[in-house]
Amino acid sequence: MKTIISTIVMVLAFTFTTNAQDKMAKTAVKTVSLEQTEGAFTQQELTLKEGSYVFEISNNNVGHQVGFVLVPKGKDASKPENHIQTAYVTKVVDNNSKEKSNVTVLEKGEYVYFCPMNPTPQYTLTVK
């Protein structure tokens, strides 16, 4: 009887651990690395899955500071109230350096990203 109870306890513990690990994997924060050169991002289109992301922005010899703006597609990107503010880098990106954003949760849909300081065109980010 002791062996049966021990086996049941081990199976339950394994099941709970596996479920917790699966849930953690689904909510894990992923990093999206983007590089800016003079007047452009080198990655001109992105497709991601729904989830939590940190944007890491590299300034590759632009010659001045750069930033990062993410906006739901169709919203006026010139209005800061439409920007997804968690996607802003936490500090402007100095020449030849990198900075990261806060964690940003992305849901299915289309977004545009750009840098008004560089300035760059608006590029498409699709979340499936």
Image (tube, helix red, strand yellow):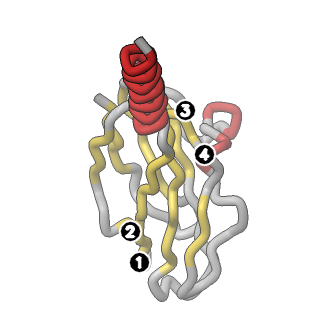
**CB atoms of marks 4 and 1 within 8 Å:** no
Check disc 4 and report the residue beneath it.
103
The residues tagged by marks 4 and 1 sit, at their Cα atoms, a distance apart of 24 Å
Quarter of the N terminus within the rendering = top left
**Residue 90 visible, this orientation:** yes
Q: Which residue is drawn at 60% across and 45% down?
A: 103
**CB atoms of marks 2 and 1 within 8 Å:** yes
Q: Residue at x 45, y 83 (%)?
A: 60
Any mark on residue 37, and which? 1
Of 22 and 74, which appears nearest the observer? 22
**Between marks 2 and 4 in the image, the one whose residue lies nearer the viewer:** 4
Mark 1 residue element: strand
**Between marks 2 and 3 in the image, the one whose residue lies nearer the viewer:** 2
Mark 3 residue element: loop
Q: Earlier in the sequence, mark 4 or mark 1?
A: 1
The residues tagged by marks 2 and 3 sit, at their Cα atoms, a distance apart of 20 Å
